[in-house]
Image (cartoon, rainbow, N blue to C red):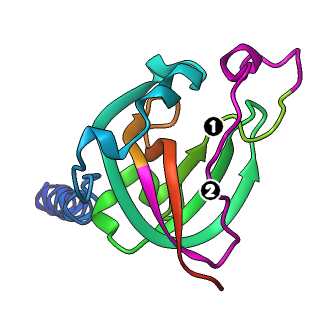
């Protein structure tokens, strides 16, 4: 019985230690005018995103870029501050923060998200893998997978080209 209690205490300590290391907090709250609120008009199923900070900025290195079937571009960054990640980012997201440039590419007229992107042309500069960037946008929890992300992205600034 003592061993079981000891194992449970160790597991609880590990869990809370990891939660302290990956709290999922926005690094800074920027004024609302620093982000483009009109982008929310083109987010597919915005109800799935719980806003943590209406406008924030995160710096990091671009680790991967992937076109998604909904027309969004997923840019995975390795953030300079791990506090921007939550436990799901750390485990499922490989310690990366997904930032989504909405309506980046045509998802086709049969796509479930086609209507959200109708008449919208994105203006976000797309970085390359390896670049150091500062991403500005809404900091949210995506309820479909539980991780934190920047969605929609208002701006991506290149800090250093790889």
Above-or-below relation of 151 to 91: above
Q: Is residue 73 left or right of residue 140?
A: right
Q: Position of residue 68 (x, y in %)?
A: 75, 40
Q: Earlier in the sequence, mark 2 or mark 1?
A: 2
Which residue is more in the foreground, 17 or 28?
28
Q: Give the SS element for disc 2.
A: strand
Tell me the CA gap for discs 2 and 1. Answer: 11 Å
Q: Give the SS element for disc 1.
A: loop
> Which residue has dot 1 on it?
102
Q: From the image, which quarter does the N terminus lie in?
A: bottom left
Q: Position of residue 104 (x, y in %)?
A: 73, 41
What residue lies at 25% left-to-right and 52% top-to-bottom?
Answer: 25
> Which residue has dot 2 on it?
75
Q: Nearer the viewer, mark 2 or mark 1?
A: 1
* Main SS category, magenta section: loop
Q: Position of residue 76 (x, y in %)?
A: 59, 60
Above-or-below relation of 131 to 156: below
What residue lies at 56% left-to-right and 25% top-to-bottom?
Answer: 43
Residue 122 highlighted magenta (yes or no): yes
Q: Residues within 10 Å of mark 2 (few under 14, many from 20)?
A: many
Q: Is residue 133 left or right of residue 81?
A: right
């Amino acid at each position: 019985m003592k061993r079981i209690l000891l194992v449970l205490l160790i597991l609880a300590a590990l869990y809370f230690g990891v939660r302290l290391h990956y709290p999922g907090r926005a690094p800074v709250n920027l004024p609302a005018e620093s982000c483009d609120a009109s982008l929310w008009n083109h987010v597919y199923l915005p109800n799935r995103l719980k806003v943590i900070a209406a406008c924030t900025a995160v710096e990091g290195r671009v680790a991967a870029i992937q076109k998604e079937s909904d027309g969004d571009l997923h840019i995975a960054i390795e953030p300079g501050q791990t506090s921007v990640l939550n436990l799901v980012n750390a485990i499922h997201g490989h310690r990366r923060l997904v930032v989504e440039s909405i309506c980046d590419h045509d998802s086709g007229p049969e796509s479930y998200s086609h209507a959200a992107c109708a008449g919208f042309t994105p203006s976000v500069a797309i970085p390359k893998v390896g670049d150091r960037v500062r991403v500005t946008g809404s900091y949210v929890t995506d309820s479909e997978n539980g991780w934190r992300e920047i969605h929609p992205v208002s701006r991506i600034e290149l800090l250093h080209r790889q």
